[in-house]
């Protein structure tokens, strides 16, 4: 019971963080690994995604209802994100991602410093592209980040948010809404793979999914209430923690 309570609480917090700015896996995945240290890693990763997709789905639905986005142009990009995730997971079976593990904290540091330096970044919603151009650029971002998610994973939501802000000109609220849609598809494709391999603990997922939805509901409401400035603040905090976590994993473990 204590183990379930621990991961349920972690899932609630992860749902909140993920709904606002991405990065929920930073909380839930380590909680699963520390609570079940003898479990097969693939099972914990599969269970993490199977729980998180519920909160992501709820957040996506809330954003779709309240944030105006060109969803028809973004849906093909979401499909590309899912395909990229599957391709990344397949590539993982062929290559060793250690080089990426060491480069990740440096990439995140660049994102962190750039966001801090550009005080107005993501505060105003001013899309740079329209029509087919927007669909193509969004699709390129989705395919690339989706591939990274399948291959490695940490910080996927944060990369989506940053690139939609920096490249497409979205504010942080609209970028977070778009990132939820992308994450929904990347998680769905990954879960299909984990299910086929029997790597999901459904009894644990059932508990975590409920609390993840609750956390997602709270996070989405906070983001919609306080807007882009609030999302930007949470984003900077999450990326800062990701830098420390990924640097520790890459160089000191």
Image (cartoon, rainbow, N blue to C red):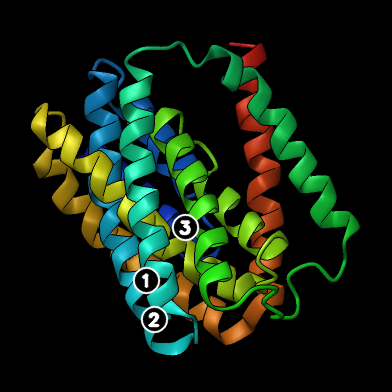
Tell me whether the residue at label 1 lies in contact with that at label 2, contact meaning CB atoms closer than 8 angstroms.
yes
Residue 47 at x, y = what percent? 23, 38
What is the crowding at mark 2: few (fewer than 14 residues within 10 Å), some, or many (at least 20)?
Answer: some
The secondary structure type at the circle numbered 2 is helix
Image spot of residue 240 (x, y percent): 71, 44
User: Does dot 1 land on a helix, a strand or a loop?
Assistant: helix
CA gap between label 3 and label 1 equals: 11 Å
Mark 2 vs mark 3, CA separation in Å: 16 Å
- In-image side of 251 versus 88 (left or right): right
**Marks 1/2: CA–CA distance:** 6 Å
Residue, far front: 132
| Residue 3 image position (x, y, % from top left) | 25, 36
Instruction: Say whether disc 3 or disc 1 marks the residue closer to the N-terminus.
Output: 3
Q: Write down the residue under mark 2.
A: 64
Q: Is residue 26 left or right of residue 103?
A: left
Looking at the image, do the residues carrying marks 3 and 1 touch, with CB atoms under 8 Å apart?
no
Quick check: 125 above or below 182?
A: below
Residue 11 visible, this angle: no
Please identify the quarter of the rendering in which residue 4 is found.
top left
Question: Does the rendering let one see residue 165?
Answer: yes
3 or 1: mark nearer the eye: 1
What residue sits 10% from the left and 42% below the top? 202
The numbered mark at residue 18 is: 3
The residue under the point 29% across, 65% down is 57
Residue depth check, mark 2 versus mark 3: number of the one nearer the observer: 2
Q: Residue at x 30, y 32 (%)?
A: 45
Nearest the camera: 72 or 88? 72
The one of 19 and 9 positioned closer to us in this rendering: 19
- The image quadrant where one finds the C terminus is top right
* Quadrant of the drawing holding the N terminus: top left
Which residue, given by chain and number where applicable, does mark 1 sit on?
60
């Amino acid at each position: 019971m204590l183990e379930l309570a621990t991961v349920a609480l972690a899932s609630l917090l992860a749902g909140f963080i993920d709904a606002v700015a991405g990065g929920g896996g930073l909380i839930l995945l380590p909680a699963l690994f520390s609570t079940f240290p003898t479990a097969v890693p693939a099972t914990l990763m599969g269970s993490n995604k199977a729980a998180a997709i519920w909160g992501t789905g709820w957040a996506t639905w809330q954003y779709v209802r309240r944030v105006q986005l060109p969803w028809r142009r973004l849906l093909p990009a979401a499909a590309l994100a899912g395909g990229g995730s599957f391709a990344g997971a397949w590539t993982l079976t062929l290559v060793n991602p250690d080089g990426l593990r060491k480069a990740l904290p440096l990439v995140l540091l660049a994102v962190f410093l750039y966001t801090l330096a550009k005080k107005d970044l993501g505060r105003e919603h001013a899309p740079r592209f329209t029509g087919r151009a927007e669909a193509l650029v969004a699709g390129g971002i989705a395919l690339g980040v989706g591939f990274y998610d399948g291959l490695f994973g940490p910080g996927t939501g944060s990369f989506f948010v940053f690139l939609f802000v920096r490249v497409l000109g979205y504010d942080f609220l609209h970028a977070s809404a778009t990132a939820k849609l992308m994450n929904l598809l990347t998680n769905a494709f990954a879960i299909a793979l984990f299910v086929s391999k029997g790597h999901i603990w459904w009894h644990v997922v059932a508990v975590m999914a409920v609390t993840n939805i609750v956390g997602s509901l709270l996070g989405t409401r906070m983001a919609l209430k306080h807007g882009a400035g609030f999302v930007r603040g949470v984003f900077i905090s999450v990326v800062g923690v990701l830098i420390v976590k990924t640097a520790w994993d890459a160089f000191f473990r």
